[in-house]
Amino acid sequence: MDKIRMTTPLVEMDGDETTRLIWAMVKEELLTPFVDLRTEYYDLSLPSRKATDDAVTMDAARAVEKYGVGVKCATITPNAQRKVEYDLPRLYPSPNGTLRAALDGTIFRSPILLPGAVPLVPTWTAPITVARHGYGDIYKGVELTGREGDTVRLTGDAGEKTVFSFKGPGVAMAMHNTDKSIFAFARSCFACALDKKQDLWFSCKDTILQTYDGRFRDIFQQVYDEEYKAAFEDAGIHYFYTLIDDAVARCMRSSGGFVWALKNYDGDVMSDMIGAAFGALALMTSVLISPTGRFVYEAAHGTVTRHWRRRQAGERTSTDPMAILFAWTGALRKRGELDGLTDLASFAGKLEDAAMAAIGDGAVTRDIAQLLGRGTVTDTEGFIAAIRAHLEKSL
């Protein structure tokens, strides 16, 4: 069989620990035998970021800006323990945060629905897509420790406000956002909802943060009124704003099937909740979309350190590769759409179908067996082999 051709490379960003191993398995078993895979490769593992003083991460971001589509493995954001483990000269920032800031992107996370899987919230019958603002808030926050007698002030050219006068030890933080980033966030969310033909919700807490969150509320309303209202009405979908506590209550009573736009921290937390309620973070897709039409596909979960320690000890693990697989299929499908390569886009769909067929056969990883309440647990290698067998039949 002739391999499916590509004309433009994907920006491939490799990662760390167990997910790095699965990344290589997926490429070797499910991609390169069937696709003439073209990638521009960047190693975002912690040793590589150490060797380049993290310059490699910005190089990858520039490559995404150039080629338009990237696919990223999970990476380590180091803490104090990791700094010692990897002998780092400094704590490098989150690669995901660097990419989000460089591309001014919004993260859209959606659950992968498995046949027979019932969400923990029984009324949810369709996926909920969480749109997480990818800039600012506490992720760019500045913090300090207050001492007894200290007064913390927020000072700008327009004036000064007292944050707090400490009567004893405590902590303080300041954070920021920009109109440019909020406008880009809003436009990405409206465009995504229109593409999916689903309602868009936006929620924050403007009753408490009347200036900060109020700015988000006002910009979303402005973008909707001036740029998307007519298109939403034509599509028969709706946009509405509500406070985040009300949105959570509405979400729990809903049937799903909408896009939920949230600020950076809110989106970080709620996407994990949505993922767990539909199944698991290992069954969650994640795509970063920039306002200039750049895309980075990745798994929503981390590097699975616990399984990595077992792998280091020589064990095989039953680690779920589905989110990594769907990161690759999402990127290949988008690359095919942009380049007019229908065979490439079709292959992505066949690979996803092969994964679902393998699950239907019942030889699955431990988390999928627990979610479905059935199946024979196999290791990662066995599950990928089962997917390949179904893929070969479909091709």
Image (spheres, rainbow, N blue to C red):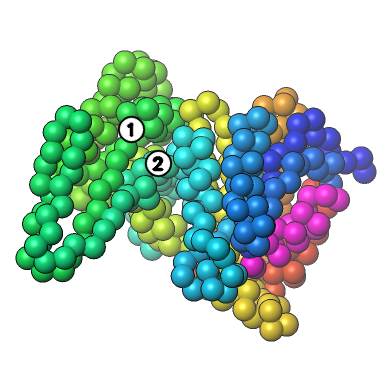
Residue at horizontal 28%, vertical 18%? Answer: 225
Q: Which quadrant of the view contains residue 179?
A: top left
Q: Which quadrant of the view contains residue 235?
A: top left
User: Looking at the image, do the residues carrying marks 1 and 2 touch, with CB atoms under 8 Å apart?
Assistant: yes
Report which residue position mark 1 lands on: 178
Would you place residue 256 above or below residue 84 in this image? above
Q: Nearer the viewer, residue 38 or 138?
A: 138
Q: Is residue 208 visible?
A: yes
Report which residue position mark 2 lands on: 135
Q: Is residue 21 magenta?
A: yes
Q: Is residue 166 left or right of residue 44?
A: left
Q: Is residue 336 magenta?
A: no
| Residue 392: x %, y % from top left | 83, 52
Q: Quadrant of the N terminus?
A: top right
Q: Is residue 292 left or right of residue 156?
A: right
Circle 2 sits in a helix, a strand or a loop, which is it?
loop
Q: Gap in Å between the C-alphas at discs 1 and 2?
A: 9 Å
| Residue 171: x %, y % from top left | 21, 62
Q: Nearer the viewer, residue 294 or 81?
A: 81
Residue at horizontal 18%, vertical 62%? Answer: 146
Q: Which residues are magenta?
A: 17-33
> What is the crowding at mark 1: few (fewer than 14 residues within 10 Å), some, or many (at least 20)?
few
Q: Is residue 323 visible?
A: no
Farthest residue, direction right: 1
What label sits on residue 19 in the rendered view? none
Residue at horizontal 69%, vertical 48%? Answer: 42
Specify the principal SS of the magenta part: helix
Would you place residue 293 above or below residue 275 in this image? above
| Residue 26: x %, y % from top left | 74, 57
